[in-house]
Image (cartoon, grey):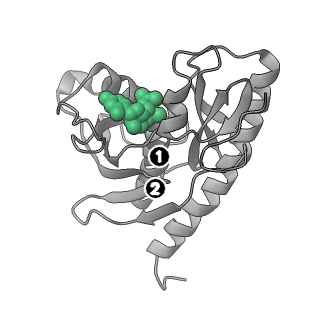
Amino acid sequence: MTYKRKDGRKNDEMRSPIIAKVGIVPNADGSAMFQIGKTIAIAAVYGPKKMHPQHSQNPERGTLRCTYNMLSFSVEDRIRPGPSRRSTEISKITQWALDPVVMLNNYPNMVVDVHISITQADAGTRCAGINAAAMALAHAGIPMRDMVSSVAVGKMDKTIVLDLDKYEDSEFEDGEGSTDIPMSFTNNGEMTHLQLDGKITKEQLKEAAKMAQKASKEIYEIQKKALKESLGDLK
Ligand code: UDP
């Protein structure tokens, strides 16, 4: 049986709208928002600044520190405020997805803080957060060797589909077909992050990576356009 998507999307089609904006938090050194379907992430960057506490300082290079937080009313069932196991995991994952592109060698003992807030959650929030964070870092003028663009691929009833929404994410939660694979890529095509939750064959994983990589290019173009727009008339 071929899986038919409830919202009528093609298997390799992302949700719409995809909206990216840069410079939305005036007090931050850099900021951005990224929306995909009903999922909205906002990222604010502060720094580079002296790392506190002092024992966390790295004399070799600056540190990237990411904090992911889903706001209480971002989903229908109110979420208890404050850190959770899930938010701690996603904060780390975000850091690892972005670390390969940020060049903090010239900032020993310093930290760049990235605060990600999910204002609306409809699945794919870690990917939206990574997309917003990458733009906010660039907006803050942090030296980067590339952009990072992130999207999830899922396996629904043995079919590989792009960018699951919450309905799809939970539909097959207990069935054998449920697999969710968030991935992040540089524009150069290097993968900086992959998470695999469920079962998948080697061939299907290859197919999923290919699909996500192609979609990441589309996301990159949207990020680039938003960054260019933030420069206004600057030639
Ligand atoms: N979710 C929720 N309450 C929670 C955690 C998650 O309602 O405490 C929903 C939310 O819509 C989220 C989705 O479940 O986007 C999928 O969460 P997951 O942990 O798979 O991460 P995500 O896909 O958002 O990166």
Please identify the quarter of the rendering in which residue 118 is found.
top left
- Pick out the residue farthest to the bottom: 233
Question: Measured along the vertical axis of the image, is residue 65 above or below residue 44?
Answer: above
Q: Image point 56% across, 23% down: which residue?
A: 172
Instruction: Give the side of residue 58 with respect to residue 211, left or right.
Output: left
In the picture, measured across the screen, residue 10 lies left or right of residue 98, that is right
The residue identified by callout 2 is 35
Please provide percent x and percent y for residue 139: 42, 61
As measured in the structure, the alpha-carbon distance from the residue carrying label 2 to the one carrying label 1 is 7 Å
Residue 209 placement (x, y as % from top left): 72, 32
Which residue occupies the foreground of this view, 16 or 132? 16
Tag 1: amino acid: Ala
Left or right: 221 in relation to 102: right
**Residue 69 percent location from the top left of the image:** 28, 37
Q: Are marks 2 and 1 in contact (CB under 8 Å)?
A: yes
Q: Quadrant of the N terminus?
A: top right
Residue displayed at 29% across by 41% down: 76
Q: Is residue 94 visible?
A: no
Q: Up-down: is 102 above or below 156? A: below
Amino acid type of the residue tagged 2 in the rendering? Gln
Closer to the chain start, of discs 2 and 1, is 2
* Mark 1 C-beta closer than 8 Å to ligand 1: yes
Query: Which residue is depicted at the point 23% across and 44% down?
Result: 73
In this rendering, does residue 194 appear at all? Answer: yes
List the residue tagged with mark 1: 128
